[in-house]
Image: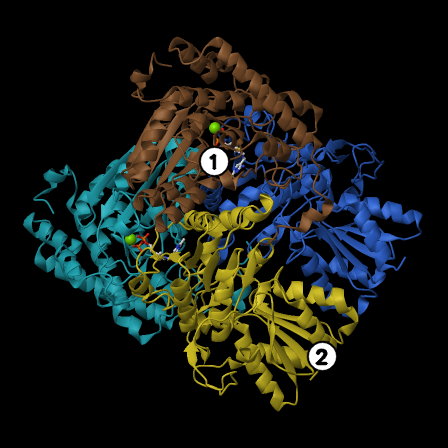
Chain colours: A brown, B cyan, C yellow, D blue
Amino acid sequence: MRNDLSSYGLTTMTKPLLVRIYVTMLRIRMFEEKIVELYPTQEMKCPVHLCIGQEAIATGVCATLEKKDYVFSNHRGHGHLLAKGCLMGPLFAEIYGKATGCSRGKGGSMHLIDIDNGIMGTSAIVGGGIPLGVGSALASQLRNEDRVTVIFFGDGAFEEGAFYESFNFAALKSLPVVFVCENNFYATNSPQNARQAACRISDTASAFGSRGVCVDGNDVLEVYKAAADAVLHARKGLGPTLIEARTYRWKGHVGHEPDYANGDRTKEELDDWIKRCPIDAMSGFMLKNNIASADEMVRVKNAIDAEIEAAVGFARRSPLPAPTELLTDVYA
Amino acid sequence: MRNDLSSYGLTTMTKPLLVRIYVTMLRIRMFEEKIVELYPTQEMKCPVHLCIGQEAIATGVCATLEKKDYVFSNHRGHGHLLAKGCLMGPLFAEIYGKATGCSRGKGGSMHLIDIDNGIMGTSAIVGGGIPLGVGSALASQLRNEDRVTVIFFGDGAFEEGAFYESFNFAALKSLPVVFVCENNFYATNSPQNARQAACRISDTASAFGSRGVCVDGNDVLEVYKAAADAVLHARKGLGPTLIEARTYRWKGHVGHEPDYANGDRTKEELDDWIKRCPIDAMSGFMLKNNIASADEMVRVKNAIDAEIEAAVGFARRSPLPAPTELLTDVYA
Amino acid sequence: MPWTKSISKPDAPKKTASNTGIERRLKYSEAILEATAELLASDPNVFVIGEGVDDSGGVFGTTRGLAERFGPKRVLDTPLAENAMTGIAIGAAIAGMRPILVHMRMDFTPLSMDQIINHAAKWHYMFGGRAKVPLTIRGIIGRGWGSGAQHSQSLHPLFAHIPGLKVVMPATPYDAKGLLRSAVLDDNPVIFIEHRRLFDIAGHVPEGPYTVEIGKAAVSRYGTDVTIAALSQMNIEALAAAETLENDGISCEVIDLRSVKPLDSALVTSSVRKTGRLIVAEPGWRDFAVGAELITRVAEEAIDAFRAAPMRITLPECPTPAGPSLEEAFYPGSIDITAAVKRLLNK
Amino acid sequence: MPWTKSISKPDAPKKTASNTGIERRLKYSEAILEATAELLASDPNVFVIGEGVDDSGGVFGTTRGLAERFGPKRVLDTPLAENAMTGIAIGAAIAGMRPILVHMRMDFTPLSMDQIINHAAKWHYMFGGRAKVPLTIRGIIGRGWGSGAQHSQSLHPLFAHIPGLKVVMPATPYDAKGLLRSAVLDDNPVIFIEHRRLFDIAGHVPEGPYTVEIGKAAVSRYGTDVTIAALSQMNIEALAAAETLENDGISCEVIDLRSVKPLDSALVTSSVRKTGRLIVAEPGWRDFAVGAELITRVAEEAIDAFRAAPMRITLPECPTPAGPSLEEAFYPGSIDITAAVKRLLNK
Ligand SMILES: Cc1ncc(C[n+]2csc(CCOP(=O)(O)OP(=O)(O)O)c2C)c(N)n1
Ligand SMILES: Cc1ncc(C[n+]2csc(CCOP(=O)(O)OP(=O)(O)O)c2C)c(N)n1
Ligand SMILES: [Mg+2]
Ligand SMILES: [Mg+2]
């Protein structure tokens, strides 16, 4: 990260906001680490796509949003949900398949929702959520509502025709939407350069006459600044921005373990990225800039520990949905 | 058109080739005009999408190809077929739904094929032919064959995700394929700027690190030059080029009549483009550069007249497929 | 269901019953236009979106004038991008709108199958009922004049297989208007399939809003010897066959299925209990389609009711040919139904 | 068809007949890998293409090691672009190749429905037989461990409705290998649907190339009281049920359908003529699916053969839930088949 707020053009950023951003990143990390710890017990009976290493993106982007703003997300969605305000209890409960889950046990880790916080759902079809987010932005425009939609998707999703068609429409109609591409350089085990001719995702925006920006996805303030600009641009009715945030996923594509042993990615690559941990970077930045003390950070961590214990307890104690729930919610 | 061959960088172009190009354009025009003449008799019982006004594109591009090279085309395909070497007889017969048609009466005007001349078929699903052409280019690459594929499609097809996904793959694998977008500024009755955010089709190629070039689609030599460069590029194994050729369709989207009376396009716009008739331009160029005399051009026209009469006669005399043909060719 | 009786050919308009006593005749295409206009006028969340919905053709007249009347924010032309446009309509629906997405041909819907099957159909269930997708997708079955293999498909079974979707296929102007209103007011995704051959056929259509219940078939002709369950345009053929057969002393009960999902097999089953014979006629291919589902449901419910083997009238097992001689051979019509009934009755 | 008898659970391997007398056991996933390797080795036109086909996972082992052995021009990883990649495979097939396109889940095929339905299925007919599309599309049905609504569908009826396509769903390692070879050598597009739950089940698989005919079902257990026609993984359940029922003195004939299109209704009809009772079990939803088509065909051919109403064992009418209690309630198994048989026989 850079030296100080002014080098980000963020001199007016308040201390509480900075702390909140730090806390959010840490909450996401610790939430995911708790899954890593518990997953081997095989009580979470669904595939989990963890975002450890990528926390700065969800955090930096959602810190620029209001509660009413919409978010659509994907299979790797825990961080997006937490950053946008979803509580841990219903999230853990959903991953446990419980009736108290945010999707009442019908969705699992890949299908999370929190309408009250503007999270409109997550699709596990790669790229599937992109047009949906453009649709909610269209709804906001048609209703003259001051609401921005953020769409989170991966570098793999960027390759789907759905992205291209959706971005064109968003640009054509100047819709209030921000496209956030989390480029972690892999789709499952395939590296970006085995899939993309150019590997310059953010440049694509110019083909639509729109704004594209590429940021260090492990620098939460860089993400925040780009997102704040993009959200303002959208609120002004000036249309979409494509933010490419470069990052790395520490764990395997799915599951709780790292994947370098499989041979598709190297341990060296992972170690390099661990050195660039977005949370360590931010805690260093906060100490250096006297935003928070080491003591305060420990207190924060303890508080999150307690939050997680309570949430897991809630989730585990909650009942599974009754078999009769199977045939409810098929039609509205 | 420009003054002379050297201003196109085409000084080595031979007179026979130039005459052939002129003849091809005129054959396409007169073929289509014959349909305009005959269509009201209601014997051609299928929708026809005429390419009058756009002849220079099919002609200029196909003049750079060899017989073995592949072409995939779309609903507006008569010109592509003729330019690539298909005879008029099987084409007219197909439009009449006859057993002697190039598709044995099963395809109609929208589904034409001539495998011997490398024309692998035409799709009436907008954009549907684009991945197919990339596929035949992949086949050529996998087999180490020296064959180029040309894909013809419209400005509407450019908006389909199929284009984007296909172009990325072609660029990624450096496939021997040329994407020829005939931008006639409309998809049915919708103008380009009601559909596209940027309206700079050829610029898109750079998002894939590939070549894009925009040419005057009514200047057959400009088209020829761009296509020749692109085909050479492809033959060298350097990958795809996106050629945007700007032009105008003189008739309505479908059928034999102009459409300005409907109110979606103006008569002025049409008249402007008629002044830029690609065939008139080329005949002027030939006269000016002493490539052919007015007399020779009349003889050419008469020969085409005779060719058309014979082809229409063949088509009309041919039998309709027997009803028993209905259930043949379902499976190979 | 008095209005389902008002099926008639343009050249042979028939007097029909009506609950007001006054007949108000509209074409099928006009009925769709009227329903759409009423919906746009009464609910600000309704909007129309699709390729060319605002152009001079107005999707065979079904959207004509709406852009002028309601403005470009209510009637939106789109790029050629069926997959994303479907997802965009779904997203707008999730955010509370009631979009009507229009396709000139059903054949273009396969481009958007992922959004329809994996998103629209599942967004309600997958999130435990917390979101919903009040979306209507209109699509038109092309036919004739060499439409060919890619511009003539119905494809209704592809949608009807999927839990979470509803599928309707009205055959009369009355039902077209009433079912379109029901579809748009429904909180679920509804696939609304029209048939090009029905567009110019007129029938009684009351003024003002009314609904026709999704999932309910209607008897459009009472009879005792054989039940003909027909879908969409095949109702025209079935009624014509029934009329011919009446002269031969054969009494056909014609049921207009109207909805494919939910499929009103109960009405058909009770009819077959009476007639003992069932023919299903639909404007699509045979395999894994409405005929199969309906016959199976009757067999499950009332196997003993069959006095003869059931029959299906469908398209032959090939893509649609373009040439006129083959097209002629391709489409079954009232003659085929008449022949089938006679075979069924050994006459 | 001796090998269809070799269905067995991993924990309960059974001795099976074999034409050589020697049993060579391979898992279902290994059988697919072996067929693919043989095809790649013998025909330079064959290539494998799909997301991740060259990675360490190797599509659950079914493509493992192929990239190393045959090189990157024969085993191609792809971008995430299912629609275009399908069209690209079709285009390569039109140009004379025999691609094997692989999807990790059937659920991703709706993205490519336009290319499959409007292009692959029609390119031969639409051009009067002048071109052909020798393409195989492999797709896997996911199940369990919270796969959820978007990672668990079979969707076979969507393809089987379309003339021009073939659809196969092998249940045994023997058939997996033989049908994959038939599919790849076939000059038409074939949808080859695998079931995740079958991958680790072993059975006899001969060394070297052989084919199993597309469109032919096989009797995997002879019986006299009831016919159970089962598809894909439901064969495991049906055979388990048949074994249980034998103890109750009930004799079940189990037919492994193997192909969905063409559907071998003749074999099932002749079985029902013997047993008088039919249950169809498939790993998908009920409406407009194999149960409906098969029951209807038997009814058309042999309505009098039914001594009781036919029955269907399918998924319930809802998207796949993710949570374990709901997943448990969602999937029918041998218990449900056993219960159905007893109900059918009033026992
Ligand atoms: C349409 C589709 N194709 C393939 C898959 C299988 N799949 C699930 S996640 C994934 C990788 C996605 O990569 P990316 O978009 O970069 O997101 P990341 O997993 O890296 O966060 C793939 C291929 C899918 N779910 N949907
Ligand atoms: C996928 C799809 N959507 C819509 C249509 C209806 N349609 C046929 S041609 C056409 C316009 C195509 O425009 P363009 O690609 O510019 O080609 P042009 O007709 O101008 O030559 C449309 C919308 C179609 N055939 N396929
Ligand atoms: Mg990624
Ligand atoms: Mg155009």
Name the one closer to the observer, D183 or A140.
A140
| Mark 1 element type | loop
User: x%, y% of residue B5?
Assistant: 12, 41
How far apart are the alpha carbons under marks 1 and 2?
A: 54 Å
Q: Residue visible at 66% across and 83% down? A: C223
User: x%, y% of residue C278?
Assistant: 68, 74
The amino acid beneath tag 2 is: Thr
Discs 1, 2 touching: Cβ within 8 Å: no
Q: Is residue B82 above or below residue C304?
A: above
Name the one closer to the observer, B32 or D295.
D295
Residue C157 is drawn in which quadrant?
A: bottom right
Side of B305 where D127 appears, left or right = right
- Residue A52 visible somewhere in the drawing: no
Disc 1 with disc 2 on a shared chain:
no
The amino acid beneath tag 1 is: Leu
Q: Name the quarter showing ligand 2.
A: bottom left
Side of C243 where D343 appears, left or right = right
Callout 1: CB less than 8 Å from ligand 1: yes
Numbered-mark total: 2
Q: Which residue is mark 2?
A: C275
* Residue D80: image tag: 1
Name the one closer to the observer, B146 or C302.
C302
Q: Residue visible at 9% across and 43% down? A: B4
Q: Nearer the viewer, mark 1 or mark 2?
A: 2
Chain letter belonging to callout 1? D
User: x%, y% of residue A269?
Assistant: 48, 15
Q: Residues within 10 Å of mark 2 (few under 14, many from 20)?
A: many
Q: Is residue B27 above or below residue C1?
A: above
